[in-house]
Image (spheres, rainbow, N blue to C red):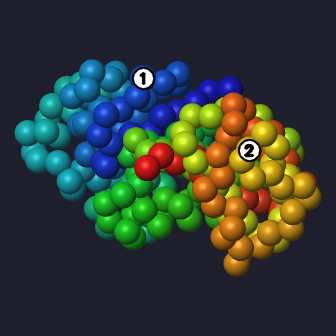
Amino acid sequence: MRRAILIAGMAKQIPDLEGDYFGIDRGAFIALHQGFSLQAAIGDFDSITKKEREELEKSCPMVVLPTHKNETDSEAAVKHVLSLGYDSILLYGCLGGRIDHELANLRLMTQRRYPLTLMNEKNQLEVLNPGTYTIFKTRKYLSFLALEPSCISEAHVAYPLDHQRIDMQDIYTISNEIEDQAIVTIHEGRVMMMQSDD
């Protein structure tokens, strides 16, 4: 599995993870200044200064997007790394800040069926399709929201579920806690899984 780690402009302290790093617009400058080697910087670069852009141009390949386009820089970056053959994508620093961008990133993850995980310092979100998953405790809370009518089981958590049907109106699957590692089965449907800290 090849993983691309896309760093967006809301990134603060970027974790050192396994995969190839790419920067999205201002996120590229942030990653560069935290010592990360980038495969490319992708964006229209309207959120950095001319001097910052020149520094980026000296440090990594640039994929320059037009300012006027029918997709966000994040969506263009996801499409770009998919075209390079990556089959797992982590979008880091894409939550918080402008609500329109945050919702667009959530939509990108949930509606486009890309192999995409969203992450920041306190949250990690991904979509689970039917199957059984071992979920390791990386954060305090474990939550689920149905993206369509779904059936879920959760074991080794504070509030277990057994073949529980949930739909888009249900919110009681929020703020569970993993004992050590949870076993989650999506029997049918699709759900968004969230691991969060306070």
Farthest front residue in view: 158
Q: Decide if residue 80 is in sight here.
A: no
**Residue sitting nearer the eye, 65 or 112:** 112
Q: Identify the residue at image location x=21%, y=33%.
A: 56
Q: Decide if residue 19 is in sight here.
A: yes
Query: Residue 14: where, in percent of width, then height?
Result: 36, 32
Q: Residues within 10 Å of mark 1 (few under 14, many from 20)?
A: few
| Residue designated by label 2 | 157
Q: Identify the residue at image location x=62%, y=27%.
A: 2
Q: Which mark is residue 125?
A: none
Q: Give the image quarter of residue 6.
A: top left
Q: Is residue 70 above or below residue 116?
A: below
Looking at the image, tell me whether mark 2 or mark 1 is earlier in sequence order.
1
Identify the amino acid type marked 1.
Answer: Asp
Query: The residue tagged with tag 1: helix, strand or loop?
Result: loop
Query: Residue 132: where, in percent of width, then height?
Result: 85, 41
Query: Residue 111: where, in percent of width, then height?
Result: 64, 64
**Residue sitting nearer the eye, 76 or 66:** 76
In the drawing, does residue 2 fall left or right of residue 135? left
In the drawing, does residue 165 fall left or right of residue 102? right
| Residue designated by label 1 | 16
In the drawing, does residue 193 fall left or right of residue 56? right
Where, quadrant-wise, is the N terminus in this rendering?
Answer: top right
Q: Identify the residue at image location x=55%, y=42%.
A: 140
Q: Is residue 72 above or below residue 14?
A: below
Identify the amino acid type marked 2.
Answer: Val
Q: Identify the residue at image location x=90%, y=55%.
A: 162
Q: Do labels 2 and 1 touch, CB within 8 Å?
A: no
